[in-house]
Image (cartoon, rainbow, N blue to C red):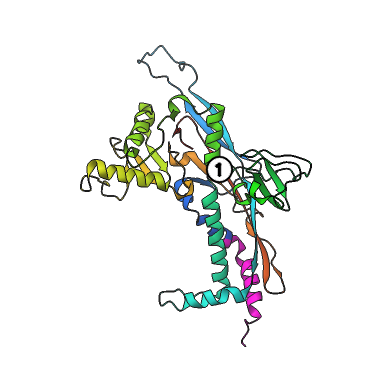
């Protein structure tokens, strides 16, 4: 019976060692949200200041006797972006992957590539998908305390524990001794959602703290197929005139986008539901200044985020030793490697951001 050549192990290990930076870069560049937010590629783990300069009012009639500005011309402030390390340990058994690889290569339209390159491309695609699908509502809990047998934990969203090398969230209140192993129904393993703070979590925290309020927090109620068009227009009209004139993007989940399209169709009909000739959707009456953008990374959220592209920031560090594939080691049946990267999210300016009251 034919066996997989031993050279597969060496090729997979060598490819990771030679192209680790390119592979991690490929993984990060494969994130859906990267084109929809501002990306900082040299963010320090110590934090990056996102400076904000506010130019103050001062216009007045010409007076040749006046040489002093009215008040302060400008003021400076800023929020800070933090990035955190993520990782995935990967065991590759060539025999398991080779059949799928050979099937793909038989496709007449397939681009012929080396087996090792194909294996790593698939692994990086999966990591991209995991980050993209989980980042919006992520909460940084990598520092969760170890589970204690004598402690009780409260169900909900606040109690996280480190148990047997994974992070768990308590979903149902426990009594002493009820661990993720003995009572798995009371715990949810959440490793993929606790690497860093996501934009959805940041927004919820700011709303709870009262820093997003008043005109910037617009009550829409639940958005459906019968009201989406009206609700998004309501948010647009709730902005200040100055902010409406700046322009920007209404970021919505796929569910909200579908609801908007359906309500638009039933309101105006198929022929009277224009996309303005460029394949995009805009808020009616905004003069094409406010685009409606579907964001897969928002999951099933009912939140609408109206602001400029650069206001949502994603950080990583392409030059850091964290963004790499660690040393690959040979196992009995294949190879084991660790992929590491840095990730973080922040909102640069809350003043020019408008959200609705849905989570």
Say how many tags the image has: 1
Residue at image point 29% right, 50% down? 278
Name the secondary structure under disc 1.
Answer: loop
| Between 75 and 316, the one nearer to me in the picture | 316
What main secondary structure does the magenta stretch of the protein show?
A: helix
Residue 135, image x and y in percent? 55, 47
Residue at image point 42% right, 13% down? 66
Mark 1: few/some/many CA within 10 Å (<14, 14-19, 20+): many
Residue 186, image x and y in percent? 65, 46
Residue 187 visible in the shown view: no
Residue positioned most to the top: 65
| Between 96 and 314, the one nearer to me in the picture | 96
Residue at image point 45% right, 32% down? 352
| Between 93 and 290, the one nearer to me in the picture | 93
Image height of 352 relative to 167, above or below: above
Residue 71, image x and y in percent? 48, 16
In the rendered view of the protein, which quadrant contains the N terminus?
Answer: bottom right
Span highlighted in magenta in the image: 1-23
Image height of 127 relative to 301, above or below: below
Q: Quadrant of residue 282?
A: top left
Q: Quadrant of residue 324?
A: bottom right
Residue at image point 38% right, 26% down? 240
Residue 230, image x and y in percent? 32, 35
Image height of 99 relative to 200, above or below: below
Residue 351 lies in the magenta stretch? no
Residue positioned most to the left: 271
Which residue is the site of mark 1? 198
Residue 235 visible in the shown view: yes
Q: In the displayed structure, does residue 119 sit left or right of residue 295?
A: right
| Between 328 and 318, the one nearer to me in the picture | 328
């Amino acid at each position: 019976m034919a066996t997989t050549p031993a050279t597969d192990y060496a090729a997979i290990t060598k490819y990771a060692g030679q192209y680790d930076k390119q592979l991690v870069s490929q993984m990060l560049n494969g994130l859906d949200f990267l084109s929809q937010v501002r990306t900082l590629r040299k963010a320090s783990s110590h934090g990056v200041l996102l400076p904000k300069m506010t130019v103050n009012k001062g216009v007045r009639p010409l007076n040749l006797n006046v040489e002093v500005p009215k008040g302060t011309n400008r003021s400076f402030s800023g929020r800070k972006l933090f990035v955190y390390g993520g990782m995935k340990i990967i065991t590759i058994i060539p025999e398991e992957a080779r059949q799928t690889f050979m099937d793909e290569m038989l496709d007449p339209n397939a681009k012929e590539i080396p087996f090792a390159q194909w294996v790593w491309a698939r692994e990086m695609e999966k990591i991209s998908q995991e980050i993209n699908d989980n980042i919006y509502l992520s909460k940084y809990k990598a520092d969760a305390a170890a589970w204690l047998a004598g402690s009780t934990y409260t169900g909900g969203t606040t109690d996280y524990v480190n148990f047997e090398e994974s992070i768990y969230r308590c979903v149902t209140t426990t009594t002493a001794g009820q661990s993720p192993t003995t009572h798995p129904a009371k715990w949810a393993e959440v490793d993929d959602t606790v690497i860093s703070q996501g934009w959805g979590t940041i927004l919820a925290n700011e709303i709870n703290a009262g820093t997003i309020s008043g005109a910037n927090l617009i009550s829409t109620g639940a958005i459906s197929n019968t009201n989406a068009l009206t609700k998004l227009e309501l948010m647009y009209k709730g902005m200040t005139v100055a902010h409406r004139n700046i322009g920007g993007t209404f970021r919505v989940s796929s569910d909200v986008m579908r609801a908007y399209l359906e309500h638009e169709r039933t309101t105006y009909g198929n022929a009277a539901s224009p996309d303005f000739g460029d394949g995009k959707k805009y808020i009616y009456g905004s003069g094409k200044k406010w685009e409606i953008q579907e964001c897969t990374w928002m999951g099933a959220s009912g939140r609408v985020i109206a602001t400029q592209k650069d206001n949502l920031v994603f950080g990583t560090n392409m030059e850091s030793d964290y963004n790499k594939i660690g040393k690959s080691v040979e196992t009995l049946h294949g190879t084991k490697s660790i992929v590491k990267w840095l990730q973080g999210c922040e909102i640069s300016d809350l003043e020019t951001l408008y959200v609705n009251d849905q989570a």
